[in-house]
Amino acid sequence: MITHRVRAHASREDLPREAQLAWKLAAAAVDPVPVERDVAEMIGNRVIDNAAVAAASLARGPVAAARAQALAHPYSPGAAVFGVAQHGAAAPVRSSPEWAAWANGVAVRELDFHDTFLAADYSHPGDNIPPVLAVAQHRGLDGRALVRGIAAAYEVQVDLVRGICLHEHRIDHIAHLGPSAAAGIGALMDLPVDVVYQAIGQALHTTTATRQSRKGAISSWKAYAPAFAGKAAVEAVDRAMRGEGAPSPIYEGEDGVIARLLSGPEAVYEVPLPGRGEPKRAVLDTYTKEHSAEYQSQALIDLARRMAPRVGDLSRVREVVIRTSHHTHHVIGSGAGDLQKTDPDASRETLDHSIMYIFAVALEDRAWHHERSYTPERAHRPSTVALWRKVRTVEDPEWTARYHDPDPAKRAFGGRVEIVLDDGTVVADELAVADAHPAGARPFGREQYIAKFRTLADGVIAAAEQDRFLDLACRLESLDATGVRALHLAAPAGALAEPTAKGLF
């Protein structure tokens, strides 16, 4: 890996485009290095993972609305929309690729249940798959090209997340996703570096937004925001292919992202990228979720399940203190200062970002479920509300340091929990990483991804359709263009939810 030092430059310095970060991202993305076997296998796992969580969300309102928007934009050849049958007179066969990316991106993101990478910033790299897949289907590209594009998208996003912190400036993490999706599409299509460079600049410029989507009363836009970035990336590539340019230098300019939105004209960021001929392996550093909740709650859900038998009668709990990292404390903990995080009437999206609620429910139920754990009845249960309001987080410098440890094998995303009972007894335990994490007690492999898919698709997707999809996903790299175009899930006739309101289309 080559570490690139990136800083703002005055306009008079006339920074050459080859020296700009957007160019270096583009060059790394389209470098035609073969995808290694273990990387290709993991990409297949993440395609399965995305489809699993998309299947489980098909009946939810935001997904139905996004799907209706996509179906209002039929196009041939186009791309498949999750849930929609691809044959028969009753249904549009394909949607325009940017709208398919939009609908599928919302379906993948709605339950907050797919993969994650945490470093200087946050990310859900699986959000890259819907736009790259949509373009692959639209352009009739094969599995080898698809895997190459997804590997490049993961590499760019993960490397940006390693080097550039957005959240400290309250910029949403989709500002790294727009460029990575554009880079992945560029690699998929084997586009020239200068075209991908322009697309990255456009995608970054149009997807930089504040983190208010993850503060206060969190709405359905949390699921739409990554889908918007994917849609914007598809459109950016289209414009760049037509010869249209982007703001330049987009990162380093006098009024660019670093100078005006991040740490300012004097700041220096270090972004690692593969050198020429070096394989793209970043997907192997990412990790999926066993539980449908914000990633920083994964280890703490596992810890709650482990501690519950030792605590026994939860009515005896006087206080629960979670000692954890700065990120966890300030994003999903007490440090966020969001009153909604202790409100039983809060949205599902808000409860998903309240470790106080999540830990209380996991402690009571000794389990976590992507639907039952979030129902209004569950959130209003008197015993839960009482326990929930006894939970607080504390930032612990040791856990913050472990969160940022440069050695991935030592990095920790959990915390230490101290449960104080009514007689003063303290039940304490800690967990560094979730059980499903690569360094956890039960790391996910192909078998676990398929099991997750079967569980979430059960009752939504017919068994034969599940089998058909898994057959394709398990041999992703060897698929021809027809196989890639068949890489979707169709729900039974009449099973898809309809949106409750009409829009413009």
Image (cartoon, rainbow, N blue to C red):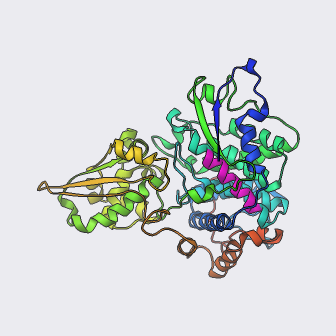
Q: Which residue lies at the image location 74% right of the left edge and 56% below the top edge? A: 149
Classified by dominant secondary structure, the portion drawn in magenta counts as helix
Q: Which residue lies at the image location 72% right of the left edge and 38% below the top edge? A: 22
Q: Is residue 107 above or below residue 161?
A: below
| Residue 500 visible in the shown view | no
Residue 223 position within the rendered picture, expressed as x and y whole percent measured from the top left: 58, 51
Residue 475 is drawn in which quadrant?
bottom right
Magenta-span inclusion, residue 357? no
Magenta-span inclusion, residue 154? yes
Residue 328 position within the rendered picture, expressed as x and y whole percent measured from the top left: 41, 46
Q: How many marks?
A: 0
Q: Is residue 270 left or right of residue 187?
A: left
Q: Which residues are magenta?
A: 146-159
Residue 67 position within the rendered picture, expressed as x and y whole percent measured from the top left: 68, 58
Residue 241 position within the rendered picture, expressed as x and y whole percent measured from the top left: 86, 44
Residue 11 is drawn in which quadrant?
top right
| Residue 303 visible in the shown view | yes
Q: Nearer the viewer, residue 452 or 378?
A: 452
Q: Is residue 382 above or below residue 475?
A: above
Q: Which residue lies at the image location 79% right of the left edge and 38% below the top edge? A: 198
Q: Is residue 308 above or below residue 245?
A: below
